[in-house]
Every structure is written in structure tokens, then in C-alpha cells.
Amino acid sequence: MIFGFLIFIHELGHYLTARLFRVKILEFSIGMGPKVIQRASKKTGIAYSLRALPVGGYVSMEGEDEDSPDENSFRSKPVWQRIIITSAGALTNVLIGVLVMGILMAAEPVLPSTTVGAFAYNEDGVCYAESSGLEIGDRIVAVNGRRTHIANEVVYEIMRNGIEPLTVTVIRNGQKIQLDHVVFPTFTEMGTLFGTVDFKVTPLEKTAFTVIREAFFRSVNTVRMIWESLFDLITGRYGMEAVSGPVGVTKALGEAAEQGTSDLVYLAVVISMNLGVMNLLPLPALDGGRLVFQFIELIRRKPVRAELEGYVHFAGLIVLMILMVVIAVKDVIGLF
């Protein structure tokens, strides 16, 4: 249901902007494959469909992949309007993620600061952060030169890069101090090494400003996490076991639901933003691939032949489907 809702939000972005620019819409579909239910509007002629495979959706528009004499076809519209329509789905996913993140932060009883409040010691009575020079009362403002506004950014930076000694910049007694060679504990997850914090932070005074600030920077950090996770996958830090499709996503959502509503909603926010970011990748069959052709047209003031663009997207769709099947098989095997 959650996955279907996020797909619906994505396609709704395409649908509303297409209607805004008077593009003729043929079908609005949630799901792919065989039709389960379909109803056509008597007023507009648009077919609204629910299809069997919950792995995506689409808004089919007149003249989207071929030239059409219809004055309201997709390709007859100015390129700037087509760019808005194409990017609207992904941007809607990200925007909804930001809005729900704000609701989550408003519901949190306490917001964390970036000020060290206490240290956590291991079984040997050692705290690596304390031994490296961090002190209670230090407000962490940067990790490895990257500015940190909220605790979520501090934790993520240490998790991703804390497998090696880090440079941590703090405000101590009103002065900025740079601590070099700060060491943190590490742990291994799915064969990948990560850093982890061994200190606790003080609570932050909760106001309308701090809630909005927390939601904004958490959202920015989530998008950054998605991009960097993709980079880490391409460079080999993560293996294929870290990649999931709808089956793996559903399993993760189920596990989050067992932890509580807040965890479930947060994971749904991450997935929504992930759908948005991934769809903007410049790959054939994705929205980002279509945007590439539209920007080429914007630059050269001449559209790429519809047939050529259609072939490229079709080839990309075939590759995407094969990848989805491989990942789905991997996810199913992982259930047992």
C-alpha cells in the first residue's frame, strides 16, 4: 500500500502538470502489466487503471514517443513545458518527503543538538571519541571539513567515513577548535565497514524554527545519502546484497512497522525521496533519460527524432526490466 501510494504521488505530479499545460492524456496507471481495473472518464476520455504488477506506474500522453498531428500532443508543447511535466513526478516525491519529514519532526518529543552531552564506554571502559580529544560541551560544527547543522548529519558523516580517523571541528567555550585524528568505533553490516558514534548529544529546545530547520537539513541529508549510496554501489563499497527491489522494500517496511509508526513513516519518506532521485538519473526509460533529450533540444533548438528517442527508451526499459527481475529473484531468495 505504501509503495503504491508513493508511485501514485509520482504519477500525480506528471498528471497534474500535463493537465495544466493541456496535454492530451490517454491513461493514468498505477502498476504495470495486465489490467485489474480500468475506468474511462466520460468527460475527458482518460483511462484510469490499476495494473497487476506493483513495480511502477505511468501517465500515457498523446505524442509522447511518436509525432502526432494533435495540437495537444506532448511533443507539440514548448520544450520548457515538457521539462516541467517530465521532472514533476520526481520533484513531487521529494516534496512530499520534505513535508512528511516536517510532520515527523514536529511529532518528535525531543530534537537532538550537535553538542556532546555524555560519552558511551565499551566493555573495556574506553570511549574512542573522548580519548581522541572530544569533550563534553563541544558543539560539533564540521566533520572532515563538511559543515554539520544537525545531529543526523554528524551521525551520517561518522557512519560513512568514520572507518578512518576524522577531523572534527567543534565550538568549545566560544572558540572554534579543530581536532585531528579523531577515532570512532566501527561495525560491519552486510560485509561493509561503518563508523559509529560513541557519545550522546544534548536535547535541543523545540520551537517552530528548530522543527523546520531539522526537517530541512534531514531532507537534504537524506537526498545526499541516496546519491552517495549510489556512488558507493558503483565504486564497489556496497555489493549487490545491498540492492533491493519491491520485495526487499516490502520486507524492510514490515520490519520498520514492527519498530513503530515513526520508523515506518521515516522509511517511507526515504523511499519517496529515493524514487525521486533515482528517476532523475540520466538513464534511458527513466524521467532523467527523457530530460536529457529535452535539454539537447533546448540547446540545439531542434528536437531529436521521435523514433530514435523511442528506440533508446525502449532499449533502456528492457535492461531495466531484466535488472528488476534479477533483483526480485535475489530478494525472494533472501526471504528464506
Image: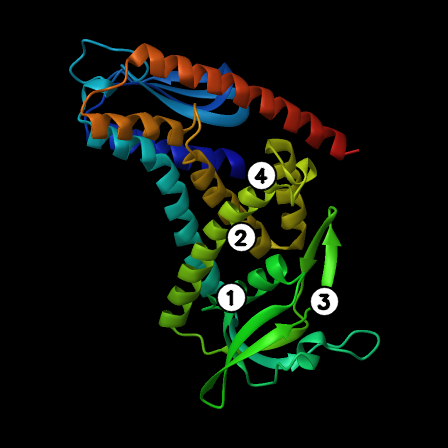
Identify the residue under disc 1: 108
As helix, strand or loop, the secondary structure at mark 1 comes to loop
User: Looking at the picture, which amino acid does disc 2 mark?
Assistant: Tyr
Q: Amino acid at mark 3?
A: Pro
Badge 3 vs badge 4, beta-carbon distance below 8 Å: no
| Between discs 3 and 4, the one toward the N terminus | 3
Q: Secondary structure at mark 3?
A: loop
**Which is nearer the N-term, disc 1 or disc 2?**
1
Mark 2 is surrounded, within 10 Å at the Cα level, by few (under 14), some (14 to 19) or many (20 or more) other residues, namely some
Q: Position of residue 69 (x, y in %)?
A: 18, 9
Residue pictured at 57% horizontal, 60% vertical: 156
Which residue is disc 4 drawn over? 234
**Which residue does the numbered mark 3 point to in the structure image?**
185
Q: Image quadrant for the N terminus?
A: top right
Q: Position of residue 124 (x, y in %)?
A: 84, 77
According to the picture, the residue beneath numbered tag 2 turns out to be 266
The Cα atoms of the two marked residues, 1 and 4, are separated by 35 Å
Q: Give yes or no for contact between labels 2 and 4 (Cβ–Cβ under 8 Å).
A: no
Q: Nearer the viewer, mark 1 or mark 2?
A: 2
In this view, the mark in front (2 or 3):
3
